[in-house]
Image (spheres, grey):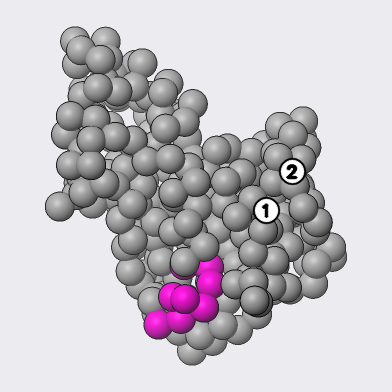
Amino acid sequence: MAKEMQGKVCLITGGAGSIGIASGKLLNAEGAKVMLVDLNDAALKKAAASVGGGDVAWATADVTKSDEVKAAVASTVNRFGKIDVLFSNAGNFGAVALIADYPEDVFDAVLAVHVKGAFLCAKHAVPHMNDGGSIIITSSIVGVKGDPGVYGYITAKHAQVGLMRVLAKELAGRNIRVNTLHPGPVENEFQLQVEKNLSAILGRDATQFFNDVIPLRRHVRAEEVARSVLYLASDASSFTTGSLLMVDGGLSA
């Protein structure tokens, strides 16, 4: 039986994180050649070993720096040829604070990673993408809703939807599909750190708080997010573009 991603080339930013690793592992298992991109070379080497299989490489880059993103794209093309899938998945969280107290430098840093980062990845990758490819941008459940004090992260996650919609319209002529992925709270270290900080603000355990308000009563696993990445990356979603795919256990319902 043919694998869903046989021979496809996938570039994943945030490649050393749990979603990046889980997605890389699944895409590689389905026949894809995978380039993992993140900030730390040692973490990337470990991530690549975890992804396993053949045709897995890594490149360090700060997605907020145009020359570094361009170099990572060039490394991908030099190693594997053109690009079929861009999974723009790099992220940071920032802070939770009242508007008068929210640090401007933190706001700038969060938008730089999520919004400028996704923009630069598309800017440099699109000229090297095969027609019929796919761009996936990791947004969030908060890309469709708001919460007090989360100014940087929520603004950035909404902005990614706007970027996706512009790209979807521009690239439709090349049959390159562009969609955003919207996980709810994920069972990983990134979310755990966020919840540790939120617990003090809420005055209760934030992990349990989220589990109480998610209709499916738990956090999503990185492997479950990866299955949605595979759907958007593969021909299974051949007529899906400009869409928001919720992977949130019903939290946005």
Q: What's under tag 2, amino acid-wise?
A: Ala
Could you tell me how many numbered marks the image carries?
2
Left or right: 37 in relation to 157: right
Front residue of this view, candidates 59 and 22: 22
List the single residue furthest toward the right: 78
- Residue that numbered label 2 is attached to: 48
Secondary element type, mark 2: helix
Q: Is residue 58 visible?
A: yes
- Residue that numbered label 1 is attached to: 69
x, y percent for residue 1: 64, 76
Q: Residues within 10 Å of mark 1 (few under 14, many from 20)?
A: many
233 magenta-colored:
yes
| Residue 36 circle label | none
x, y percent for residue 63: 60, 47
x, y percent for residue 201: 23, 14
Q: Can residue 97 be seen in this view?
A: no
Left or right: 99 in relation to 19: left
Residue at 61% over, 44% down: 21
158 magenta-colored:
no
Front residue of this view, candidates 112 and 93: 93
Q: In the rendered view, tell whether residue 195 sits above or below residue 43.
A: above
In the image, the segment drawn in magenta is 232-239
Secondary element type, mark 1: helix
